[in-house]
Image (spheres, rainbow, N blue to C red):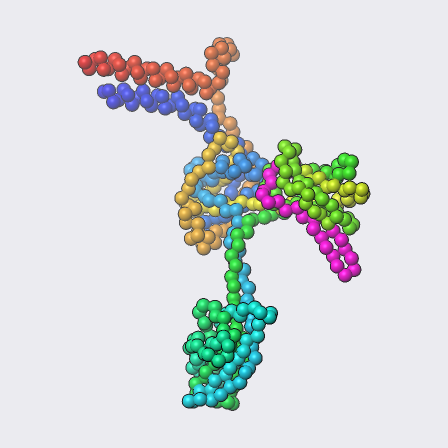
């Protein structure tokens, strides 16, 4: 009996706190997510309306299905870009000789520049006329005198299939190579080879999108002030200023709060018969999300620039989620008090990216209805305002009364038990 009474009392205290918590978790906006029929994993780029209504750190984003159930997601701000650069070293023949049923062909590699190292991991051989199939041994040397075994392989050209490369494994820095061809004849000589070096570079690139924002121009003394409007609080990466004629100016970038983003940045443009130089892009070190970005150009004694166009590049964010089992999904945002959710889906990001999520899009924005409040008679409302000012105060008072009630009942029960 005691446990039952205590449970009911604690439940009543919890319920009195629910309205306040629920009020904090209201979302102002939602957008339907238009997903393709195929594929379980979906990627979605946020649009300008979402950035305008969401928290700056995107902590209030929620994806929900038709049943109102939250769907796990993770945020991508960019991608890994892999570029490959190939270096080719040509060679010249330094002679050949026959010995023990093999012909040896010697080659000297030619450096791309004087006093630079030669490095590569693949030898590509200039093959003789087909058909043939030879077992070959490759030797390497740093000085052309002392030779070291480098690799063994088979080279062939049947007319239908060709193999003309020898894998070295790790990059080698030999300057000389000797090719031993067993069972060959002088009628089918090997005239040359090249050394190939392939280098892959990985770099993280953020998603970018370009737009032409609204702006205004004001001349003030010797300064040209360009006010770039950014009401959506987009995270600007750079601003391009197109102006007529040849010029060289210094520019500062700030906002109305007094924050400095760039100071003394050079802008210049010149176009001559034989040369053309231009630097008219203001690249920010950190994203700038101010609603108004001020570009202050110092003209000195020169006339003001004729500004023809202003373009802004801004960073984008991508959501990735699993839509399987959901008939329809929507994106909810616009809740200042919401905390960023913690989903374990991101732990499987590398596997999900290999699945190549299908691209979805956002539909029109919908304003979410505010929670209904019970109407009270005017007289009662007037009386209530004398002792509490908000629903939150009311909930605190009810909670305190409930706690006092718990203490009173527990004391009563202890006395009865004694």
Residue at 49% in and 44% down: 75
- Farthest residue, direction left: 418
Q: Splitting the image into 4 quarters, where does residue 233 fall?
A: top right
Q: Residue 261 versus residue 317: which sits nearer the camera?
A: 261
Q: Position of residue 205 (x, y in %)?
A: 55, 51
Q: Position of residue 80 (x, y in %)?
A: 51, 54
Q: Splitting the image into 4 quarters, where does residue 303 fall?
A: top right
230 vs 152: above or below: above
Residue 291 is covered by the magenta coloring:
yes
Residue 284 is covered by the magenta coloring:
yes
Q: Residue 141 versus residue 386: which sits nearer the camera?
A: 141
Q: Position of residue 331 (x, y in %)?
A: 50, 39
Q: Quadrant where the N terminus lies?
A: top left
Residue range in magenta is 269-293
Residue at 39% in and 21% down: 16
Q: Visible in this render: residue 240?
A: no
Q: Position of residue 292 (x, y in %)?
A: 65, 36
Q: Main secondary structure of the magenta part?
A: strand
Q: Is residue 408 left or right of residue 383?
A: left
Residue at 53% in and 52% down: 204
Q: Visible in this render: residue 151?
A: yes
Q: Residue 272 versus residue 319: which sits nearer the camera?
A: 272
Q: Splitting the image into 4 quarters, where does residue 169 fall?
A: bottom left
Q: Residue 364 versus residue 150: which sits nearer the camera?
A: 150
Q: Quadrant where the C terminus lies?
A: top left
Residue at 74% in and 57% down: 276
Q: Is residue 403 left or right of residue 272?
A: left
């Amino acid at each position: 009996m005691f446990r039952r009474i205590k449970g009911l009392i604690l439940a009543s205290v919890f319920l009195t706190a629910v309205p306040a918590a629920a009020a904090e978790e209201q979302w102002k906006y939602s957008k339907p997510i238009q997903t393709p029929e195929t594929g379980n994993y979906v990627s979605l780029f946020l649009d300008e309306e979402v950035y305008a209504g969401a928290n700056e750190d995107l902590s209030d984003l929620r994806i929900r299905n038709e049943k109102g159930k939250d769907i796990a997601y993770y945020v991508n701000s960019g991608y890994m870009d892999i570029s490959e650069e190939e270096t080719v070293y040509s060679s010249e023949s330094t002679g050949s000789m026959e010995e023990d049923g093999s012909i040896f062909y010697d080659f000297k590699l030619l450096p791309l520049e004087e006093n630079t190292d030669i490095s590569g991991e693949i030898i590509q051989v200039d093959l003789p006329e087909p058909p043939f199939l030879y077992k070959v041994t490759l030797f390497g040397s740093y000085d052309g005198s002392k030779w070291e075994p480098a690799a063994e392989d088979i080279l062939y050209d049947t007319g239908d299939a060709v193999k003309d490369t020898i894998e070295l494994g790790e990059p080698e820095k030999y300057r000389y190579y000797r090719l031993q061809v067993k069972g060959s004849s002088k009628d089918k000589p090997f005239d040359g080879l090249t050394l190939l070096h392939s280098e892959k570079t990985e770099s993280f690139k953020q998603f970018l999108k370009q737009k032409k924002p609204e702006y205004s121009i004001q001349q003030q003394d010797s300064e040209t002030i360009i006010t770039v409007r950014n009401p959506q609080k987009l995270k600007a990466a750079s601003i391009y200023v197109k102006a007529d004629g040849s010029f060289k100016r210094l520019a500062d970038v700030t906002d109305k709060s007094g924050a400095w983003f760039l100071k003394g940045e050079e802008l210049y443009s010149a176009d001559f018969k034989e040369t053309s130089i231009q630097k008219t892009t203001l690249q920010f070190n950190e994203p700038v999300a101010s609603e108004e970005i001020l570009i202050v150009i110092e003209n000195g004694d020169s006339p003001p620039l004729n500004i023809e166009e202003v373009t802004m590049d801004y960073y984008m964010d991508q959501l990735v989620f699993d839509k399987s089992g959901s008939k329809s999904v929507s994106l909810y945002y616009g809740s200042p008090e919401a905390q960023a959710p913690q989903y374990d889906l991101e732990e499987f990001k590398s596997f999900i990216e290999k699945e190549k999520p299908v691209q979805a899009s956002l539909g029109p924005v919908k304003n979410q209805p505010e929670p209904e409040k019970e109407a009270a008679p005017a007289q009662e409302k007037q009386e209530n305002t004398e002792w509490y000012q908000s629903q939150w105060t009311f909930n605190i008072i009810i909670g305190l009364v409930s706690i006092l009630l718990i203490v009173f009942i527990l004391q009563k029960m202890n006395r009865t038990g004694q």
